[in-house]
Image: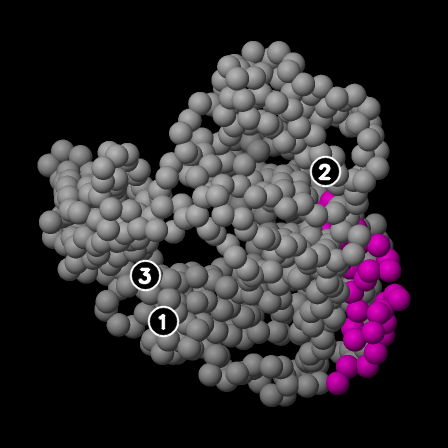
Amino acid sequence: MYKPGQEVKVRVLSLHGAELLLVTEKYPEIWVTTPSRTRVAQWNNVDNSGGLVHLSFQLADEPEQGIYTISVKNSQNKVTEVMFEVEEYVLPRFEVKVNSPVYILARAKAFSIGVCAEYTFGQPVRGNVTIEVSNSLRNQCQTKLVKTKDIAGCTAFQFTTEELRVIDCSVRVVAVEVVVEEEGTGVRQTDGANIWIEMQLYSFKIVYKDKYKKPNLPYTLKARLTFFNGTAAERVPVEVCAAGKCATMFTQEDGIIATVVWANYVESIKISTLDHVLTSDRPPSIGTSSPFYSPSNSSLVIQAPGGRVKCVPGQKTRLNLPVLFSCQQSSRAGIHAQKTQAPRNISPSDRVSRKDPIPGPKRWNWRASELPIDPDHLIDGFPPTYPSPPIVRAKFSLQVVLPPTASPKVKLLIWDTRDDGEVVADSVQLDVERCLGFSAQTPRGQRHGPPGEEIELSLESEAHAVCSLGVVDRSSELAAQGLHYRPSAETLLLASLQPRRGCSWSPPQVDDEKYCARKIFEGSVGEDPSHSFGEHSYSSDYVDSLKMFDNSGLLVISDMTLELDHAKERTGKVSGR
């Protein structure tokens, strides 16, 4: 936001492709328009040999106020626009902050709300403060509490859940509004907050679970139990039920509860606390899975890390992912690996490896080994020691190398080509933290000072990196609050790499409806039911290796066995699809 008569500064930086390569081509045209679309500044054939363009122009003393637009045309005649506001305003001299809990428990008797008022250079503000607290309800349950007191920097207010009628009116959120008036000037600044009411002491969050239940391999689910305020709930007794059996476990220090199920079919896993402080109408957390079908009962499972993968700007990220494997009547396997990221495939030189880079499918002999399973995490116990026919189970590691420019979502696919023609596959998606190909930072130093004082700042980065350092007066930020949010350059650049919601990388290859229709009616006389709508509906409870390729965005052309042969007709008729 600018005031009339100020100088507007413009910086233009263009990056190209997923590798964020610097663009140094000329800009044919850059111009600025007023809210009425009148051009007030223009530059033609702007030199961009350095990769970063700096421009500026002066606003008139009495300009048209409102939203101005800066337009940049590149060599492909594509126009990019960004807006700023011109308005006559007075910079605020101080800031007000409400310090309140994000959540409170419904049965808590009282809670505190803090208020602080400080000048932009750090000194406390003297005056008076008025706070209004509401239970956000209407009619007979509506309650508003107003309190006023003097303030000299910071103060606190006490409220009870009883006076806000939290329990009897089932209050879900408490709204807080604060007004601070400066002593002597009458200048006012405001702030607000919402306090959410939690009806239950605990909550579960799934941090990892196998997407599919694979034959002859355990199904793993990890959940974190936290208190209503987000802190980990350690050593809390929890009941876990799956495959017709239940077990009592205790959460770890970080609130994690790990569950392992051996049963070949796991419809759901239900987790609930054993103590009776959970007074909520919410159901226990449930983890569901789809069974994987393999004619030979063979399996591959990639155990991906929970949460986002850490990314350091300018450095490659190396992961060692454990892979569980099981097969019958075979002790050899040829493992292929492929890593993809939207919207393109990684180059062949940047592949996934097992310790050393794998130039192609590699075959080696398997030796049965114990899987890394803690007996305390099992719900239904270990499988038979000597099954018939014999089953070979093993574990190995895949090393994944991610460049710093990897997109926020990376997909990993591995598959084994068996001698009988079957393909056994698994795929996972890795969520990667956003970061750029180089690092830049401002070392710790003087961060604030009173008006008129000179402050020295420094910027450190790698050689040949294009960097920019912006300094904005804190008063200007306060004045612009609630007007127009402007994301950082890093947010804009990385958001452009994110696939659009609702758009897949490639058309799906899996169509259970048509496939099952053909399988059920193979050899019958009459119309192919896969082209008939309204009479029958077909589905499968299983997934197969083709689904793993489909999840990874890879098209499969093969004469090997990838599709399942388990289909069923749904009961009843459907009106269409």
Q: Is residue 308 above or below residue 42?
A: below
Question: Residue 90 sits in which quadrant?
Answer: top left
Circle number at residue 259? none
Q: State the CA–CA distance, disc 3 to disc 1.
A: 10 Å
The x and y percentages for residue 534 are: 56, 31
The amino acid marked with disc number 2 is Leu
Residue 428 visible? The answer is no
Disc 2 marks which residue?
13
The coloring applied to the image is: one colour
Determine the secondary structure under disc 1: loop
Q: Is residue 88 above or below residue 562?
A: above
Residue, far bottom: 385
Of callouts 3 and 1, the N-terminal one: 3
User: Which range of residues does the magenta coloring cover?
Assistant: 338-367
Circle number at residue 228? 3
Locate residue 418 relative to residue 194 in the image: left or right. right
Locate residue 502 relative to residue 42 in the image: left or right. left
Circle number at residue 233? 1
The amino acid marked with disc number 3 is Phe
Q: State the CA–CA distance, disc 2 to disc 3.
A: 44 Å
Residue at 52% in and 28% down: 2
- Circle nearer the viewer, 1 or 2: 2
